[in-house]
Structure formats: C-alpha cells, structure tokens
Amino acid sequence: MSDSSPFMNPFRRRQNSENGKSGNGTYHPRRSNAGVARSNGEINSDDPDAHQIHVGGTPTEKGVNVEEAVLPNPGSVSDSVPVGDWEPSTQEDLADHFLRCAKLGRYLTIADNSRFIITDDFRTTPIVSTASAMAAIYSKDYLVAQAALLPLSERAQRLSPRDQERFERLFLLIEEQALSDDVRSSAQAVRQAQFRAAEIRAVEAELGDRLSPARLRYRHFLDIVKKLVDRKITAGPFLDEFRDFTQDVAGKLDFGIYSFCLDRLFGSVRVPLKVKKLLVLELLKYPPLIRRELLTNILVYPGQIEELVEFVRYMAANELEQGAIIEIELLKAFKLRQLSMGDIETSLAQTGVA
C-alpha cells in the first residue's frame, strides 16, 4: 500500500468523492469546495484541501499583538474570507483558532476540525504570517511548530530592511513565548543571522532529518495494514507491529499524520472490530492529551459503528478518572459543533479540569 492511497493520504476527504459515503458506508452530504486565501489575498478554489484555512483579521489576545510585527501590508488580508459554506456564520481568523486550540490544551486543528495541522500544511498551502506565527508559538507538536517557522523565515528574507525589522520583533516574540525550546533556539538563530538563506536551510534540514526516517517507517506500517485487511496476518501480530510503529515514530512524526493513520484504521469497514477494540485498549495507556484527542476522533467519526462507540465509552468509564471523561465528552461536543470553544472553557473552569 503506497502513501498515495486513500487510506494514507492526509489530504483526502473522509467522504467518497462520488457518492458522498464515509469510510463506513454511511451517507454524508458532500461539502462544497472552498477557497484557500493566497498570501496576496487571491482565492484558489481548485485546492482539494482548501477547506482547511480561515484568513482574515489580526488577532489580539491579552498582550499578544503580532499585527505590527507580522504584517508589512496588513491591508492585503484585512477582509475575512470564510473557508466554506458549512462554517459557522462568525468569520474567524485561523490565528485566533490556533490560539484557542492552545488555550484548550489541544493540538492544532484546521479550521473545521476535520483533521490536525501537519508539517506539510506550511509547505504546500499559503498561510498568512499571523497564523504561522501562532502555530510556531503554540503548537504542542514540535515538528509542526518548527515547520511553521520556515515560511516566516523565508518571507522575512525577501523583505526590505524596514519590513524585516517587524519580523525581527515577531521572532523575538517567538523566542520569548514558544512552547518548544528547539523552536525558540531556531527563531533566535535565524534572527541573529539576519534571515540569511544558509541558516534557514539549516533549520529546514534539521526538520527533514527528523521527518524522513519516521515517514519511511509510516509507509512500512501501511504495508502491515494492507496485510491485515487482506487477512494475511491476525490481530496479535498486527498489534505487535502497531506498538513497534508507535514507538518508532513517537516524537519524530508529526501528530496529525499519526492521528490520520488511526482515523483510517477506526473508520475502515475492512479492519475487524476485534482489532479496533484492541487498539482502543492501547490508546487508554497513552498520555492524557494524546488519549483525549484520539479517543474523541473515534467517537465523532462519520458513520462510526455504534458497538465501537459504546466500547470506547465503557472502557473510558472503567479505566479513566472522571475529569478525563469530562474532557473527552466536552471535546466530542465541540467537534460535533454542540458547544463552542467558549462554552468548553467555561465548563472546564467550573469543573476544575482545565
């Protein structure tokens, strides 16, 4: 199974492109194509994953104001552009969305929460500098944060000395506030080198050195998945392979791709239910943040079989503390658009699990 297959490709929609069916055979209406905002304000409606981005006004959050530092020409992105007609009526900037994800203790998602941000998003899709800056500062995934730093560095390299000063202030902000020590060090090195191409290439090479071996391992695991669905291996050996795969990619492969892999496993009708239940038992052992994200993905997957949903709830109720269960239920409600981020923040504050 190659990494260009529908099972693997993180840029495929979850619906069948011809008949609107999900991976479990349940019908879901197709989403209309949306536009990705280019850095010059133009819209590309042909991008197959264009629904991932909101572009618009500049965020200001309790002393964090990156407008002056990031946008030499803020007028080019001043008008908010909705990413699709299924989005809420309130138009929200992607940078605001990243910031709110961080405040809720989440990994960064795309604007409609259909998947997580991955490193490739900053290489293949134009993202305005405010959003890239927020990702570099707040992403809990080091590789995604490092990837977000690269387009900022490359843009600064092309600017006039006056505009470069604004990016220097931005990189100082990243050095002060980024969650990752490595990202802070990279931002400092690039700034002190005055955005020279050699330093930017060094950061990019470091990122590539971490990603390439892990992605090769990921492709190897896809072959194991293919053997499972073709009934060439049983549940026990597959689970051993899954554990080895998780161990090999931990901290080396961006979380969004790892999450997508599990998403495909739990959504495929060809993967036996017994295997899915065994995988759930593995997820229960994961750190709280990762466990919460991955278990919630199972619960909200379109057309997910009820028996698996009930199994997840039963095991969570018996194995997890009440606070962790509440977090999972709140995140599930958010992903299903039953609660807003503000509602969740309030609920977490009231229950003391924030």
Image: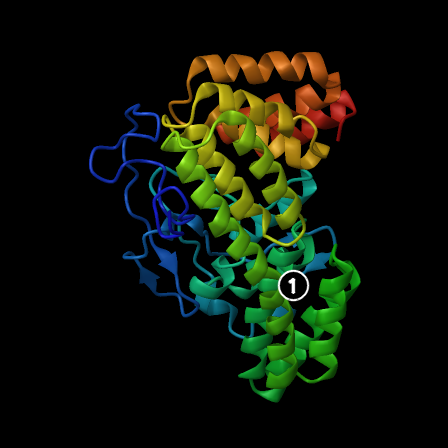
Answer left or right for 154 relative to 248: left
Judged from this view, the residue extending furthest toward the left is 18
Q: Residue at x 64, y 75 (%)?
A: 167
Q: Residue at x 47, y 12 (%)?
A: 307
Crowd class of label 1 (few under 14; some 14 to 19; many from 20; radius 10 Å): many
Q: Quadrant of residue 193?
A: bottom right
Q: Residue at x 73, y 16 (%)?
A: 322
- Vertical position of residue 48 compared to residue 89: above or below: below
Front-most of 307 and 126?
307
Residue 182 in picture, x, y percent from top left? 74, 63
Question: Which quadrant would the C terminus be assigned to in this image?
Answer: top right
Judged from this view, the residue extending furthest toward the bottom is 161
Front-most of 324 and 70?
324
In this orientation, does residue 33 appear? yes
In this orientation, does residue 196 appear? no
- Vertical position of residue 64 compared to residue 314: above or below: below
The color scheme shown is: rainbow
Q: Tell me the SS state at disc 1.
A: loop
Residue kind at label 1, given as amino acid type? Val
Question: How many marks on residues?
Answer: 1
Q: Look at mark 1 in the image and give the residue it sits on.
A: 66
Q: Residue at x 48, y 56 (%)?
A: 56
Residue 241 in picture, x, y percent from top left? 57, 38
Q: Quadrant of residue 168?
A: bottom right
Residue 164 in picture, x, y percent from top left? 63, 81
Front-most of 234 and 310?
234
Residue 218 in picture, x, y percent from top left? 52, 50
Judged from this view, the residue extending furthest toward the front is 232
